[in-house]
């Protein structure tokens, strides 16, 4: 029987999904990170299928999301996007330590997967944590600085007022560069990494995401089985069931 536990660790609300017969064992652990304006409960179908395969799955709420929502509208929230991503990365380390220290996670088998903002977080986390064994990016992009600059350009083209000076923007870009996997690709270290992306995605454009994948491919020479990019020709910014099942298969094969 799959059990769902609602918990809070260091003020981070989360859902903890695990097979009941193994709930006290040190299991391979997967973090599932939700997308922008979403919440932890929206991805329980992933957690259920992964838990069926013997994984312990943890789904946290990002700052300003789910139980941590603070009444910001989507436009107001968008100006906090990258701060949320960076906080997600920092909180991932806190959660990992908690589960490992409690004897509930096999620290040699820890994976991270996310959709959209969660996928972007996943790729940034790989640049920071060598304990991440396997990753899955569902509609993400690891080139933080380039993507952030394109977001600002889009806002300007649509005459949206940006509450930051040029100097402040450049400072923010310099912070993002520290988490930008495209600027430190050697940190991939051959770790298994799966991408899924819809070719018609208007939110996280397909082209730059695929460019990132092509750029890191040279780091997987001789390890091609550990890197894959699944292209859905018809999908937009929504993962298909095929993408869901391939995510489960990837972790089952590589973790």
Image (cartoon, rainbow, N blue to C red):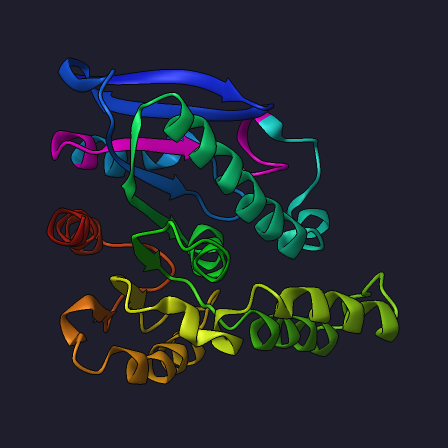
Residue 61 visible in rendering: no
Quick one: 140 or 238, which is closer to the camera?
A: 140
Quick one: 143 or 94, which is closer to the camera?
A: 94
On-image quarter of the N terminus: top left
**Residue appearing at x 50%, y 74% in the figure:** 184
Residue 67 visible in rendering: yes
User: Looking at the image, is 244 positioned above or below residue 19?
Assistant: below
Total residue callouts: 0
Q: Where is residue 59 in the image (x, y as percent from the top left)?
A: 40, 33
Q: Is residue 67 found left or right of 23 in the rendered image?
A: right
State yes or no: residue 64 in magenta.
yes
Looking at the rendering, which quadrant does residue 108 occupy? top left
Looking at the rendering, which quadrant does residue 82 occupy? bottom right
Q: Position of residue 76 (x, y in %)?
A: 73, 48
What span is in magenta? 50-67
Q: Position of residue 129 (x, y in %)?
A: 46, 53
User: Looking at the image, is 213 positioned above or below residue 163?
Assistant: below
State yes or no: residue 7 in magenta.
no
Q: Is residue 217 found left or right of 8 in the rendered image?
A: left
**Residue appearing at x 44%, y 79% in the figure:** 208
**Residue appearing at x 49%, y 41% in the figure:** 92
Q: Position of residue 27 (x, y in %)?
A: 22, 30
Q: Is residue 74 found left or right of 32 in the rendered image?
A: right
């Amino acid at each position: 029987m799959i059990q769902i536990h609602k918990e809070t660790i260091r003020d981070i609300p989360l859902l903890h999904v695990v097979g009941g017969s193994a709930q006290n064992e040190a299991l391979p652990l997967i973090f599932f990170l939700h997308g922008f304006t979403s919440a932890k409960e929206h991805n329980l179908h992933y957690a259920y299928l992964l838990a069926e395969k013997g994984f312990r799955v943890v789904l946290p709420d990002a700052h300003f999301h789910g139980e941590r929502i603070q009444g910001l509208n989507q436009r107001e929230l968008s100006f906090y996007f990258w701060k949320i991503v960076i906080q997600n990365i920092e909180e991932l380390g806190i959660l990992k330590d908690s589960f490992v220290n409690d004897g509930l996670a096999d620290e040699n088998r820890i994976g991270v997967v996310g959709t959209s903002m969660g996928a972007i977080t996943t790729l940034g986390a790989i640049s920071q944590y060598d304990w991440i064994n396997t990753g899955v990016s569902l509609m993400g992009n690891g080139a933080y600085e380039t993507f952030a600059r394109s977001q600002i350009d889009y806002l300007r083209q649509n005459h949206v007022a940006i509450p930051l000076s040029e100097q402040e923007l450049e400072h923010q870009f310099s912070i993002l560069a520290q988490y930008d996997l495209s600027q430190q690709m050697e940190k991939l270290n051959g770790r298994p990494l799966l991408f899924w992306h819809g070719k018609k995605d208007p939110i996280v454009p397909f082209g730059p995401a695929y460019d990132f994948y092509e750029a890191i491919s040279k780091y997987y020479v001789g390890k091609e089985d550990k890197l894959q990019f699944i292209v859905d020709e018809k999908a937009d910014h929504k993962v298909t069931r095929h993408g869901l099942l391939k995510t489960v298969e990837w972790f089952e094969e590589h973790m």
